[in-house]
Image (cartoon, coloured by chain):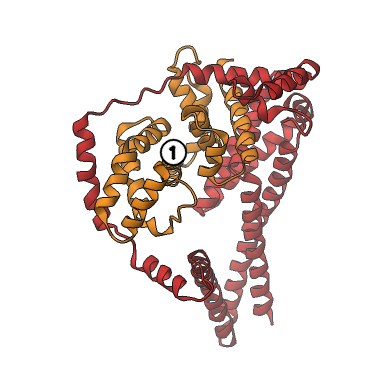
Chain colours: A red, B orange
């Protein structure tokens, strides 16, 4: 993407002939002296060429169809007339002096309240579980305490490899995202192929260990990206690398990895605090 | 001219006059259908979405303050609903065979026939589906519907600069994808 001083964002208008003469002339002048903008212009021309060849033929629908359109629509309108809640909000808004509460603000409050309820619902089982584990410790037999400690250790053992993997994957994804232009970036990536293969193998083994469907999904997305990166073996594979980078961006992979990493860290901390509570 | 008429009709609709809404539907039903069809390229989908858009507009008619044209308000709804359908279709196609569904879908993409042997429209639609929702909307309205940058910015509630930038990015992405398919 070209920065300030270039004419990239006006190339479409220029190519479809929608610019004033003066602006057109200034773009032509710029193109003569700027090879990067000439390159971008060529790309936009290629895309336009394909778009112009693509003719979407919209079906010619009969007059009969359009006469029936309202007949089909009317019952839906009657059935789904404006909701009572919305009416209430509208009335409330106009009764308040100075439009105290706009519907948008009201929805904001409702959203916030729902958020609080959802958070409580998420936290409640943990609170409940904590009180369940804390109160019986007074009467628990040493055997039960030992068993509970074993379980904590198992959970910790389960989370640690995930945290290590997510940390490595996150660092790698960020590095791939921040590569320079693909052609240059690919030179930086080639020596890292071993690392890609190692991460892919690690990812595969973790896929078999996790029970969380969202984590399964993330791991399969990561594996797909890593598998694709492992096929980038020559400098000519720049477009492949570019697609992978887009995939990382489009699926927000770095953020998802970070979220799962934090989730495991939290689990680990909870286990540790339960363990220390059990020891007391 | 149209704008004034529409606003008067909308006022009547707000007072509960369903017949007045019928005027608006008859005026814009074809446009709504065309926009949905261009995005979805399927008659049943375009039919469902155009009708759903009218229902949504009717439900929210009191929020329409007449600052924009009624047609802009309607188009925005049609575009948003159509893009939701496209996004859902994409997700369903990927999720249908999980685990590993996305992997297979991506492999399919890599292994699909080259551009000369497949219908251009199919390829283009796949390429368009890879754009962000906003880029899809900008491309559709600006290129296919022939709307001006200003009209698109009003429909999508963003600046004209953003429209130009998104269109440029969309074109570059399309070129890259189509170039990749040709190689």
Outermost residue, bottom direction?
A138
Please tell me which residue lies in front, B129 or B138. Answer: B138
Task: Decide if residue A233 is in sight here.
Answer: no
- Identify the image quadrant of the N terminus of chain A: top right
Outermost residue, top direction?
B116
Q: Position of residue B73 (x, y in %)?
A: 44, 47
**Residue drawn at point x = 72 percent, y = 19 percent:** A25
Outermost residue, front direction?
B1
Up-down relation of residue B15 to residue A37 (above or below)? below
Up-down relation of residue A59 to residue A80 (above or below)? above
**Which residue is disc 1 drawn over?**
B86
- A278 vs B134, left or right, is right
Count of numbered marks: 1
Task: Decide if residue B170 is in sight here.
Answer: yes
Q: Position of residue B70 (x, y in %)?
A: 42, 47
Picture quadrant where residue A232 is located: top right
**Residue drawn at point x = 64 percent, y = 20 percent:** A43
- Identify the image quadrant of the C terminus of chain A: bottom right
**Residue drawn at point x = 60 percent, y = 37 percent:** B163
Q: Residues within 10 Å of mark 1 (few under 14, many from 20)?
A: some
- A189 vs A252, left or right, is right
Q: Position of residue A57 (x, y in %)?
A: 36, 22
The secondary element bearing badge 1 is classed as helix
- B60 vs A270, left or right, is left
- A146 vs A211, left or right, is right
Q: Chain of mark 1?
A: B
**Residue drawn at point x = 61 percent, y = 20 percent:** A15
Picture quadrant where residue A13 is located: top right
Outermost residue, right direction?
A33
Picture quadrant where residue B59 is located: bottom left
């Amino acid at each position: 993407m070209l920065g300030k001083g270039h004419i990239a964002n006006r190339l479409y208008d220029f190519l479809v002939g929608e610019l004033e003469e003066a602006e057109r002339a200034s773009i032509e002048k710029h193109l003569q002296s700027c090879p990067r903008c000439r390159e971008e212009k060529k790309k936009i021309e290629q895309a336009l060429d394909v778009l112009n060849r693509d003719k979407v033929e919209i079906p010619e629908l009969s007059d009969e169809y359009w006469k029936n359109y309202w007949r089909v629509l009317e019952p839906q309108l009657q059935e789904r007339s404006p909701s009572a809640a919305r009416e209430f909000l509208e009335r409330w808004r106009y009764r308040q002096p100075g439009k105290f509460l706009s519907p948008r603000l009201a929805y904001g409050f409702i959203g916030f309240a729902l958020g609080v309820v959802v958070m409580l619902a998420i936290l409640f089982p943990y609170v409940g579980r904590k009180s369940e584990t804390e109160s019986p410790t007074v009467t628990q037999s040493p055997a039960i305490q030992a068993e509970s400690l074993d379980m904590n250790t198992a959970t910790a053992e389960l989370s640690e490899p995930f945290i290590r993997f997510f940390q490595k994957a996150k660092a790698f994804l960020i590095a791939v995202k921040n590569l320079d232009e693909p052609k240059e970036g690919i030179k930086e990536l080639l020596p890292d192929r071993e690392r890609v293969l190692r991460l892919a193998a690690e990812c595969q083994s973790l896929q078999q260990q996790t029970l969380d469907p969202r984590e399964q999904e993330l791991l399969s997305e990561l594996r797909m990206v890593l598998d694709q990166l492992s096929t980038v073996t020559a400098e000519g594979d720049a477009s492949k690398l570019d697609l992978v980078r887009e995939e990382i961006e489009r699926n927000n992979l770095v953020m998802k990895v970070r979220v799962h990493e934090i989730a495991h860290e939290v689990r680990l901390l909870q286990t540790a605090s339960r363990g220390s509570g059990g020891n007391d | 001219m149209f704008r004034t008429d529409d606003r008067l009709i909308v006022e009547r609709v707000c007072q509960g006059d369903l017949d007045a809404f019928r005027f608006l539907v008859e005026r814009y039903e074809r446009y709504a259908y065309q926009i949905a069809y261009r995005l979805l390229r399927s008659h049943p989908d375009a039919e469902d979405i155009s009708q759903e858009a009218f229902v949504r507009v009717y439900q929210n008619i009191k929020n329409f303050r007449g600052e924009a044209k009624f047609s802009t308000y309607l188009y925005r709804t049609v575009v948003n609903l159509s893009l939701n359908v496209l996004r859902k279709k994409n997700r369903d196609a990927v999720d249908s065979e999980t685990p590993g569904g996305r992997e297979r879908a991506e492999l399919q993409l890599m292994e699909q026939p080259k551009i000369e042997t497949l219908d251009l429209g199919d390829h283009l639609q796949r390429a368009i589906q890879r754009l962000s929702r906003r880029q899809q909307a900008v491309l559709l309205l600006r290129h296919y519907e022939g709307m001006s940058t200003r009209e698109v910015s009003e429909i999508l509630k963003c600046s004209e600069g953003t429209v130009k930038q998104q269109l440029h990015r969309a074109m570059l992405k399309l070129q890259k994808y189509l170039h990749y398919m040709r190689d």
